[in-house]
Image (cartoon, rainbow, N blue to C red):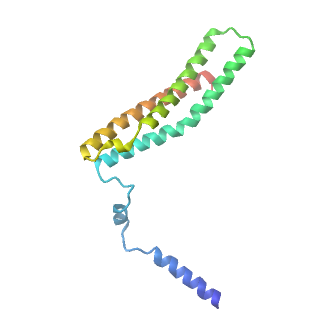
Amino acid sequence: MVKGMVLLSMTALLFSCGSGSQSPADAGQNNSSVPKSKSDSMYKAVMDGHDAAMRKMGEIARYSTLIKQYKDSLQKSGSKDALKKSALDSALQGLTDADEAMNKWMEAFDPDKAGAAEETRLAFYTSEKEKIAAVETKMDSSIVAAKKITGR
């Protein structure tokens, strides 16, 4: 009987905590992740670009390792295929440059530099969106080149 009362009390408590009178539309108004201005929307776009680029970092690392292995194999086999070596070097350099571009952007990005005025913030985040888009383009092209040279 006591266990039943405890269970009933816990169930009632759970349901009472979750039964707010806010509609889903009202609930979104209090959510800090919902953009409230153009600069907030642009900041979100910058962060979306950052997140997309970050997902590619693992792929860049994998291809860098793979290409280094290919270069080692080519060297160990005594191959004098300068064209293949040059293509591997170029693909590896592209991956390295893309990785460095991402790291450099992350080090330089500082939302505190956006300022307080809406116009200043919007301009800052628009610029940062362009920068992270350029980094992502560099990452994409380096991955495509690595896929082409490795056949994977």
Of 131 and 7, the residue lying toward us: 131
At 51% from the left and 25% from the top, the residue drawn is 97
Residue at the (72%, 19%) spot, across then down: 73
- In this rendering, is residue 73 above or below 35? above
Query: On the rendered structure, is 40 left or right of 145?
Result: left
Quarter occupied by residue 78: top right
Q: Is residue 5 visible?
A: yes
Estimate the x, y position of residue 106 in percent, counting from the top left: 46, 37
**Along the viewing direction, whichever of 108 and 72 lies nearer the viewer:** 108
Q: The C terminus appears in which quarter of the rendering? A: top right
Query: Foreground: 15 or 2?
Result: 2
**Residue 136 falls left or right of residue 87:** left
Q: Position of residue 134 (x, y in %)?
A: 41, 30
How many numbered marks are there?
0
* Residue 61: percent from left, percent from top: 60, 32
Q: Is residue 152 visible?
A: no
